[in-house]
Amino acid sequence: MNRTGLPLPWTGLIVALALLLQQAIALVYGEGPAFALALWQVGVMALGIASLALVLMPPRRIAFALGFLICAALLAWAFWLEHIEGLDPCPLCMFQRVAFAAIGLIFLVGTFHNPGRIGSWIYALLLVAVAGVGAALAARQVWLQSLPANEVPACGMGLSYMLESMPFLDVITRVLEGSGECADKGWVFLGLSIAGWTLAFFVAIAVAGIALARRD
């Protein structure tokens, strides 16, 4: 039993069963870009990341600091892919970056504030809300990436141009609709695209935020 109250053997068992079920689904759907398979792969990774966070979770203040560093590292990696590897972010990617920046700011404020039980629940609710928005954006992009080539929408305007020429609410609507460039995976690791990994991290962050609030 670790400090979060989560039995370590059960954590390993859940992850192992999830991996086995992932393989079973892969046999049914094949290796194509099926949305169900993509979501399950994301779920497996989110479960693994969240389980690791729960098992290794340090005291609350250190956990907030680590959360900030993780968000900073993810944003740094995104900028590396953009400016060094030449992968231009789509509008949905840019909105997900904003969500990670907001989550990082919440973690940073929590680090200096070092809240008690009630304050931790407020931070947890903020983390769940922002991570939920980010997860919805990432899930939308994962869905676009799972579409057959003949169903992918046409490429749209860049985010900068939309912000300069359109009302902000119209920009949000256009971004949420998605466009052809959002369906391009670009970079894939362990079977997941950037959108898949960001979705997994958003889910894990929401779980970790609740776990932090429940700690003594």
Image (cartoon, rainbow, N blue to C red):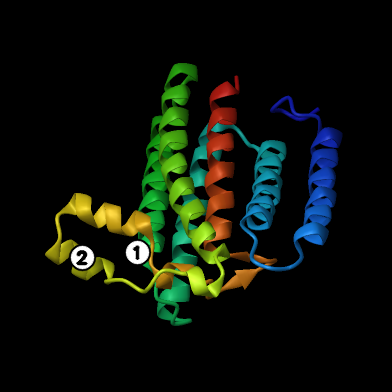
Q: Amino acid at mark 2?
A: Met
Looking at the image, residue 14 sits to the left or right of residue 55; the answer is right
Which of the image's four quarters has the N terminus? Answer: top right
Looking at the image, residue 26 sits to the left or right of residue 130; the answer is right
Q: Secondary structure at mark 2?
A: helix
Image coordinates of residue 61 in percent, x first then y, are 51, 34
Are discs 1 and 2 less than 8 Å apart at CB?
yes
Looking at the image, residue 100 sits to the left or right of residue 172; the answer is right
Q: Quadrant of residue 208?
A: top right
Which of the image's four quarters has the C terminus? Answer: top right
Q: Residue at x 61, y 57 (%)?
A: 35
Q: Which residue is mark 2?
A: 162
Image coordinates of residue 134 in percent, x first then y, are 44, 48
Q: Residue 104 versus residue 151: which sits nearer the camera?
A: 151
Residue 204 visible in rendering: yes
Q: Residue at x 69, y 44 (%)?
A: 47
Query: How many marks overall?
Result: 2
Is the residue 187 above or below the residue 105 in the image? below
Q: Amino acid at mark 1?
A: Pro
Q: Quadrant of residue 179?
A: bottom left
Q: Residue at x 45, y 36 (%)?
A: 127
Q: Quadrant of residue 170?
A: bottom left
Q: Earlier in the sequence, mark 1 or mark 2?
A: 1
Q: Residue at x 76, y 65 (%)?
A: 30
Q: Mark 1 packing: few (<14 Cα in 10 Å), some, or many (20+)?
A: many
Instruction: Find residue 91 and name its label.
Output: 1
Q: Secondary structure at mark 1?
A: helix
Alpha carbon of mark 1 to alpha carbon of mark 2: how far?
A: 10 Å
Q: Mark 2 packing: few (<14 Cα in 10 Å), some, or many (20+)?
A: some
Residue 184 visible in rendering: no
Image coordinates of residue 2 in percent, x first then y, are 76, 30
Instruction: Find residue 174 and name its label.
Output: none
